[in-house]
């Protein structure tokens, strides 16, 4: 997803988010088994990578969101109501 965000492919980012959501739902209902220390460390490494990528994606999305906000929010005094006589 980070690669897609860096390319500006926000449709791919959205698709990745949906896939992640489905995986999270699956894991919430999975029967988990104990893992050894090496597996636990690898899981922690992956979680840290996911969190770092998420922060980087948010950093890339923030300017786009600000631009969208600017476009959608009328400038002060730009929108006027007109009365018909």
Image (cartoon, grey):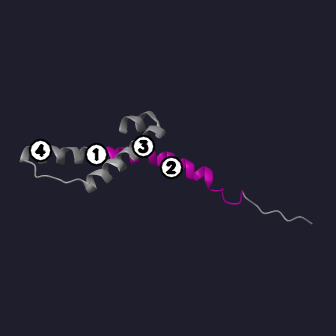
The label on residue 50 is 1
User: Which residue matches tag 3?
Assistant: 60
Label 1, label 2: how many angstroms apart (C-alpha)? 21 Å
Q: Secondary structure at mark 4?
A: helix
Q: CA distance from mark 1 to mark 3?
A: 15 Å
Instruction: Tell me whether the residue at label 4 lies in contact with that at label 1, contact meaning CB atoms closer than 8 angstroms.
Output: no
Q: Which callout, 4 or 3, points at the residue further toward the start of the chain?
A: 4
**Residue beneath label 2, please?**
65
Q: Quadrant of the C terminus?
A: bottom right
> Observer-nearest residue: 38 or 27?
27
**Left or right relative to 11: residue 33:** left
Residue range highlighted in magenta: 51-78
Whole-angstrom CA distance, mark 4 to mark 2, is: 38 Å
Residue at 71% of width from left, 60% of height from top? 77
Tag nearer the camera, 1 or 3: 1
Upstream in the sequence, badge 3 or badge 2?
Answer: 3
Q: Residue beneath label 4, please?
A: 39
Q: Tag 3, which secondary structure?
A: helix
Residue positioned 27% across, 56% down in the render: 28
Task: Kindly report which numbered mark, 4 or 2, lies closer to the viewer in this rendering.
Answer: 4
Furthest residue to the right?
85
- Asked where in the image residue 80 lies, by quadrant, the reply is bottom right
Instruction: From the top left corner, tell me how far across and down residue 47 is, in percent.
Output: 23, 48
SS under mark 1:
helix
Q: Quadrant of the image for the N terminus?
A: top left
Instruction: Please state the horizontal and vertical placement of residue 78, each as a whole percent of the image.
Output: 72, 56
Q: Is residue 77 magenta?
A: yes
Would you call the spot at circle 4 few (<14 residues within 10 Å), some (14-19), or many (20 or more)? few
Disc nearer the start of the sequence (4/1): 4
- Label pair 1/3, CB-CB below 8 angstroms: no
Q: For residue 39, what is the image quadrant?
A: top left
């Amino acid at each position: 997803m980070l690669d897609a965000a860096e390319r500006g492919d926000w449709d791919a980012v959205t698709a990745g988010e949906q896939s992640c959501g489905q995986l999270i739902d699956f894991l919430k209902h999975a029967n988990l088994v104990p893992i050894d220390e090496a597996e636990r460390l690898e899981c922690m490494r992956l979680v840290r990578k996911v969190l770092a990528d998420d922060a980087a994606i948010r950093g890339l999305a923030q300017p786009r969101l600000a631009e969208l906000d600017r476009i959608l929010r009328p400038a002060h005094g730009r929108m006027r109501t007109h009365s018909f006589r």
